[in-house]
Amino acid sequence: MSFFWIWDFVKPVSEIIILWIVFYHVLVFFEGTRAFQVFRGISYLLIMFLGAQILGLDIINWLLTKFFAISIIALLIIFQPELRQGLARLGQQHLFNIALEESEIVAIIEEVATAVYKLARQKVGCLIAVERETRLKIYIESGLEVDAKISAELIQSIFLLPSPLHDGGIITRGNRIMSASCLFPLSDNPSFSKIVGTRHRAAIGITEHTDAVVVMVSEQSGEVSVAADGRFISIDNRERLAGILKDLLVSEVKKKK
């Protein structure tokens, strides 16, 4: 008898913990998108719903049940782009990642930073996407195969005219440039459409669909930017660029160890 009494108490507590963990990961996944605030609001309503069930508040429980039923359909329609991007990320995860030592990653970052600032001084536009966990196969296949070791000289030769590969972006995997002249999806975030150009929107767009890190040089101003998770920041010197890339790429490797 005592076992069933304990289970009657443990069961709802377990449900709350499991649902809260799931919802927390959903919030983290959609952080930085327009769906984030809505999901956070729903998490508060979910707490109310579970509290109403535990306390036996039948009227509140009935109202919230009806509200959630309608909300699910509305959310599927309103946030269809975010859900599509989320499913795309899940479907593109690496089963096995190319393992690089920290020193190798730092050396690659130095090559990229050197090339980027040499191009920036000449106001030569460039887009460099660094693959992380999410596979960039569909974007790699949109360009022309390179499959060569990353070096500052190779990056510059790709983007400097009269190279036939200077349009589009390059994609790196591990210590190699996989493809050049790749097409990146443009961001459909309305907050960017009027303040940035096509190259910025392409850099932001691929980071909205994947977890890639993108380094970009503006052809008009020579300004250097880094995009990740659907956001971008401007970089004012080579050392800061290298530092930010180390934070994004090296720290990820340390977490896995």
Image (spheres, rainbow, N blue to C red):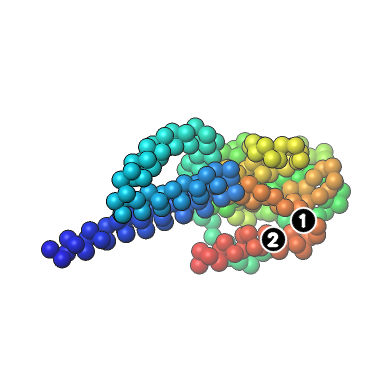
Residue at 76% from the left image edge and 41% from the top image edge: 196
Residue 143 seen anywhere in this rendered image of the structure: no
Tell me the residue that label 2 is attached to: 244
Q: Earlier in the sequence, mark 1 or mark 2?
A: 1
Disc 1/disc 2 C-alpha distance (Å): 9 Å
Give x and y (percent) for residue 35: 54, 43
Viewer-closest of 140 and 7: 7
The local secondary structure at tag 1 comes to: strand
The quadrant the N terminus occupies is bottom left
58 sits left or right of 82 in the view: left
Q: Label 1 is placed on what type of residue?
A: Ile
246 vs 75: above or below: below
Q: What number of labels is visible? A: 2
Give x and y (percent) for residue 186: 66, 37
190 vs 6: above or below: above
Residue 243 seen anywhere in this rendered image of the structure: yes
83 sits left or right of 62 in the view: right
Name the quadrant containing residue 205: top right
Residue at 42% from the left image edge and 34% from the top image edge: 70
The local secondary structure at tag 2 comes to: helix
Tell me the residue that label 1 is attached to: 235
Q: Label 2 is placed on what type of residue?
A: Ile
The 10 Å Cα crowd at callout 2, few under 14, some 14 to 19, many 20 or more, is: some
Give x and y (percent) for residue 189: 65, 39
15 sits left or right of 78 in the view: left
Residue at 71% from the left image edge and 63% from the top image edge: 243
Give x and y (percent) for residue 81: 55, 36
Label 1 with label 2: CB-CB less than 8 Å = yes
